[in-house]
Amino acid sequence: MGYALLWQTRNQMVHENKTWIASEQLKLMWTSCIRQLSSIARKEYTKPHTRTKGLQLQLSIDCLTSMDVEAPQDDEPHPPPAP
């Protein structure tokens, strides 16, 4: 994951006064990472010499997205509010 997503999150918090809870941030990062991996898989699949790698990556992504993994609930400690 690149710095772009972190920068977007920072800008939303600073300029738009958006507050994030851990589950929202996890979902945003997960979606972004899956989108980037899918893009790489499509690119690799279109090239004849890397088609197998692209297919393997897409199958791995499909397995990851089909798993029912429950995100941790919002029971983690929160930092104190800024003064």
Image (cartoon, rainbow, N blue to C red):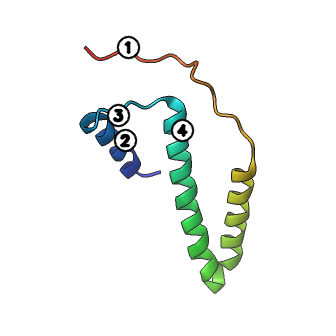
- From the viewer's perspective, is residue 68 above or below residue 33? above
Quarter residue 50 falls in? bottom right
Q: Secondary structure at mark 2?
A: helix
Callout 3–callout 4 Cβ contact below 8 Å: no
Q: Earlier in the sequence, mark 1 or mark 3?
A: 3
**Residue 45 position within the rendered picture, expressed as x and y whole percent measured from the top left:** 64, 77
Q: Which residue carries the number 4 mark?
A: 26
Q: Report the Cα–Cα distance between label 3 and label 4.
A: 15 Å
**Residue 58 position within the rendered picture, expressed as x and y whole percent measured from the top left:** 68, 65
Q: Report the Cα–Cα distance between label 1 and label 3.
A: 16 Å
Badge 3 amino acid: Lys
Instruction: State which mark lies toward you, 1 or 3.
Output: 3
Q: Earlier in the sequence, mark 3 or mark 2?
A: 2
Q: Quadrant of the C terminus?
A: top left
Badge 1 amino acid: Pro
Q: Earlier in the sequence, mark 2 or mark 4?
A: 2
Callout 2–callout 4 Cβ contact below 8 Å: no
Q: Report the Cα–Cα distance between label 3 and label 2.
A: 9 Å
Mark 1 crowd level (few <14, some 14–19, many ≥20, 10 Å Cα)? few
On the rendered structure, is 24 left or right of 60?
left
On the rendered structure, is 29 left or right of 79?
right
Residue drawn at 68 percent across, 71 percent down: 53
Q: Secondary structure at mark 1?
A: loop
Residue drawn at 46 percent across, 18 percent down: 78
The disc at residue 9 is 2
On the rendered structure, is 2 left or right of 48?
left
Residue drawn at 40 percent across, 48 percent down: 5
Callout 3–callout 2 Cβ contact below 8 Å: no
The disc at residue 80 is 1
Instruction: State which mark lies toward you, 3 or 4.
Output: 3
Q: Which residue carries the number 3 mark?
A: 18
